[in-house]
Amino acid sequence: MHNNFRVSMTWVHTWFGLVLGYVLMACFFFGALSVFDREIDRWAIPKTRFEPQPMPSFDNLLMDVYKKLEPHPVDMAATAERVIGDLPDPKTMPLVSFYAYTTHRDPVLAIGGEFSIPNKPKNPADDHLHVHGWATIDPRTGEAIPDDALKIGSGWFYPMHYSLNFHWNNLGYWIVGFAALMMLAALVTGVIMHRKIFKEFFTFRREKRLQRSTLDLHNMSGVVALPFHFFFALTGLIIFAGIYLPVSHTMLKPLHDQHEILDAERTGLPHEAAGVYAPIASVDAMVAEAKRRWAARDMAGEVGYVFADHLNDENGYVSIYRAGSDRVALVGEPIHFKASTGEVLREEPPQAAVFEINEFLTGLHLQHFEHWMLRWLYVIGGLLGCVCIATGFIFFVEKRKQQHAKLNSQGARLVDALAVTTVTGMVIAAIAILVANRLLPADLTGKGEWEMKAFWGAWLLALIHAGWRSAPVAKAMANPAWREQCWVIAVLAVAAVILNWVTTGDNLIKTLFTDTYWAVAGVDLSLLATAVIALWTARKLKQRALAPVGDSPRRAAHEPVVAGIDMAAEVKNG
């Protein structure tokens, strides 16, 4: 391709970064928001604005809740297409397993379960088909919180980070996975390109012309957060390896099924129901015993997850997992009980080193631990990734738009329009869904669907606006869409804060000083900070647009080389 190895790496870095940068921008931005996904949920669903609660009593509260749990209509429809004959009445389906999950940041409790069906699967490989039901409840009362209330943080921003909310044939996972793999290549080629990497950690010439200062900021943000970017791209691929390489459920399915049976024999946790009725014993007594055993191992803590299988059967068992918010690794130290008697069946021993490393890396990526300062460092790292990609877009356009204007090419214009859509347009979409959340009536049927439409609609409008206003780029001038969309961001962010105040009464004075509630206050403060940054950026862009062309700093004679690469040679080589 190129005779010079470093020039070849520059080509790989440039084009991989450009083509996949649009995907990675979304991954970084929504990944940063996902660090506080539960707090965004509290802002979006006012009914959940109370303090985090411990796991409630099973015997006195949750058992009655599970008796009212029904199969979810969405899963009923999906399962009906995979079985022979019609499914029975949902009210007649027996509950055969259940779970309950909470964290130190969750006021609400997520519950769910599996319902047995008599139907045979159309595909013999679909063994053990069940219909699933799930719900979100108030753990203080057992009252269900309507499922059509979209959890914007954990139910929209978080999956946007790893699947783009594009679930057809898991294609979103594959797109993000490929982008993460190419990101690793881009990071490696970036290091090869920039031999003076330590110097670039401290180099930012703000007063230089846009191309120079943008490249400095691109290099600096990339170098500062290089370990962060590499680690999260790598661990993201590890976490979803089961999707990218699903051999255990395809080529090795018979071996996988046999392993489950052997594992059940080894652990003493029955794989199949016995078919003999046996009522479940006191789960609260099992919880108390689990806490006693954790305390004896110097790991006193609350329950984070409870799972029960083969309900009301002789082979039924209950697994109780410790909430691991005091450690990085996603290890719940589970203790398993015989459901009918409360007898301890198994206390999980320490895992092998390979599994411990995997759990540590997974836990470090998902950051379910309780450490607020480290959470903010995660946010900063994610936003630095956004800055690195955004400045890469701008540098690409600035370096080529003069040449493209002479050739009457629309290439720079297209890239710039897509960059505006990906950077400011994405922020507009994220705030627009919050504005829609506060504008739409709380009891509106299908409110969550309308909020999703507001998100995609706002992003589509940002794309149309960016393309329409990008004509000056074809003449080697700046795109006014950057400035105009910054104004939109500022207006929407302030509007979201005001609407939250008007519709719930939770203004910043109340959430900061009167009835302190940091989840809501944090979202409002973040929105106001976003508005300030957007206004400052819009003002700077306006000043740059009004500045005489001759005032732009010219390239100094002593600046022919950027990070060891001749920029003229780089332009010549593509």
Image (cartoon, rainbow, N blue to C red):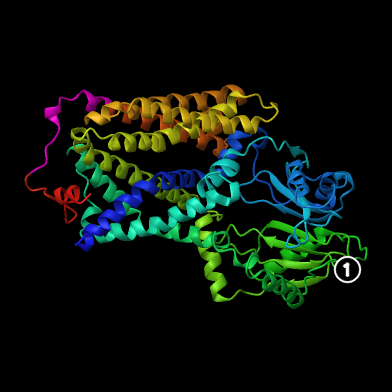
Q: Quadrant of residue 519?
A: top right
Residue extending farthest to the left is 557
Q: Which of 475 and 448 is in front in this view?
A: 475
Query: Please, is residue 561 above or below residue 541 in the view?
Result: below
Asked if residue 228 shows in the view, the reply is no
Query: Please, is residue 272 above or below residue 565 in the view?
Result: below
546 on left or right of 308: left
> Which stretch appears magenta?
542-556
Q: How many neighbours does mark 1 have within 10 angstroms: few (below 14), some (14-19), or many (20 or more)?
A: few
- At x 66%, y 67%, the residue is 333
- At x 65%, y 64%, the residue is 249
Q: Nearer the viewer, residue 410 or 127?
A: 410
Query: Please, is residue 127 above or below residue 555 in the view?
Result: below
Q: In which quarter of the image is residue 153?
A: top right
- Please state the horizontal and vertical placement of residue 148, each as a whole percent of the image: 69, 35
Report the amino acid beneath label 1. Ala
Q: Which of 237 and 267 is in front in this view?
A: 237
**In the picture, which quadrant includes the N terminus?**
bottom left
Instruction: Please name the residue that numbered disc 1 is placed on.
Output: 274
Helix, strand or loop for disc 1: loop
34 on left or right of 263: left
- At x 40%, y 45%, the residue is 383
503 on left or right of 81: left
